[in-house]
Image: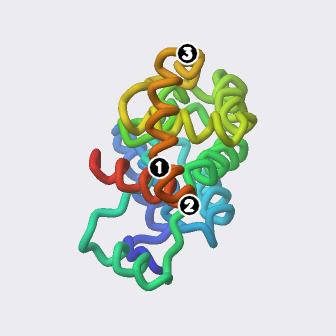
Amino acid sequence: EKVKKGITPESIIKSARMAKQAGMDTTQFIILGLGGKQLSKLHAIETAKVLNEINPDYIRLLTIGVKPGTGLDSQIAKGEFILPSETHMISEQRLLLEHLENITSHYANHHSVDLLLEVRGSLPTDKDRMLTILDRFLFLSEADKINFILGRRLGYYRRLSDIKNELQYGIVEKQAQKIRRTNSDSFEQVFHDLRRQVI
C-alpha cells in the first residue's frame, strides 16, 4: 500500500498468462527491499507465489534505491518506510529464490545496483548454485560484509570472490575506516546513497 503500483498479484498473473498464450516471452522485474524492513519476508514469499503461478521466461532482480524527492523518499524521512539493510535484502532474495518451485525461468540479478551480479542462472538447474552464492555472502563476518558491500558500491569489486584480492581489500578497508571514524552507524546510509547514484 505504501508503494502504489496500481496493480494486483491477480492482474499480474492474468496479464502474464495472456502474453504467454499469445506466444510472447514474459519478463518479471522484482525490486528487492520494496516491502521495506517490516514486510521483507512477506514480500519475498508472496512474490515467489506469483512467479510460481506465471513461470515467466525471465526473472530479473533489482535492488531498491530511492531517488530524492520521491514519495517513498518522503516516507523514509518521516519514518513511515524503513529501508532494509544490504544484508537484509540478500536474505530476502535468498528466501524468494528458495520458494521458487516447479518453474523454468532464467533468473538473474540484472543491474549494476545489484550486490551479487553472479547470482544468475536457469531454474531449476542452477538454483542450488545461486543459493550457495547468497549463503557465502551471508556467512561472511560483519567486517567482510561491510568491506565487500562498500567495495562493490565503489566499483572495486565485481564478484564476491574479489574480496580475496588483498590489495583491493586493503584499499576498500581504508575507505571503511574513514566512515567508521565519522560515524560507524552511517554505513547503510552510505550504501544507499551509492545505490541511488546508479538508478
Indicate the position of residue 74 as horizontal and vertical percent values. Answer: 35, 80
Q: Is residue 116 left or right of residue 24?
A: right
Circle 3: element type: helix
Q: Amino acid at mark 1?
A: Ile
Indicate the position of residue 34 as horizontal and vertical percent values. Answer: 49, 63
Q: Earlier in the sequence, mark 2 or mark 1?
A: 1
Dot 1, crowdedness within 10 Å: few (<14), some or many (≥20)? some
Q: Is residue 17 visible?
A: no
Please tell me which residue is depicted at 61% across the width and 29% down the height of the picture: 123
Q: Earlier in the sequence, mark 3 or mark 1?
A: 3
Q: Is residue 175 left or right of residue 70?
A: right
Label pair 2/3, CB-CB below 8 angstroms: no
Please tell me which residue is depicted at 55% across the width and 42% down the height of the picture: 55
Indicate the position of residue 156 as horizontal and vertical percent values. Answer: 40, 26
Position above or below: 31 against 90: below
In front here: 72 or 147? Answer: 147
**Residue at numbered disc 2:** 185
**Residue at numbered disc 1:** 179
In front here: 57 or 186? Answer: 186
Q: Earlier in the sequence, mark 2 or mark 3?
A: 3
Residues under labels 3 and 1: Cα distance?
A: 20 Å
Q: Amino acid at mark 2?
A: Asp
Position above or below: 87 against 160: below
Position above or below: 16 against 158: below
Q: Amino acid at mark 3?
A: Glu
**Residue at numbered disc 3:** 166
Indicate the position of residue 13 as horizontal and vertical percent values. Answer: 49, 58
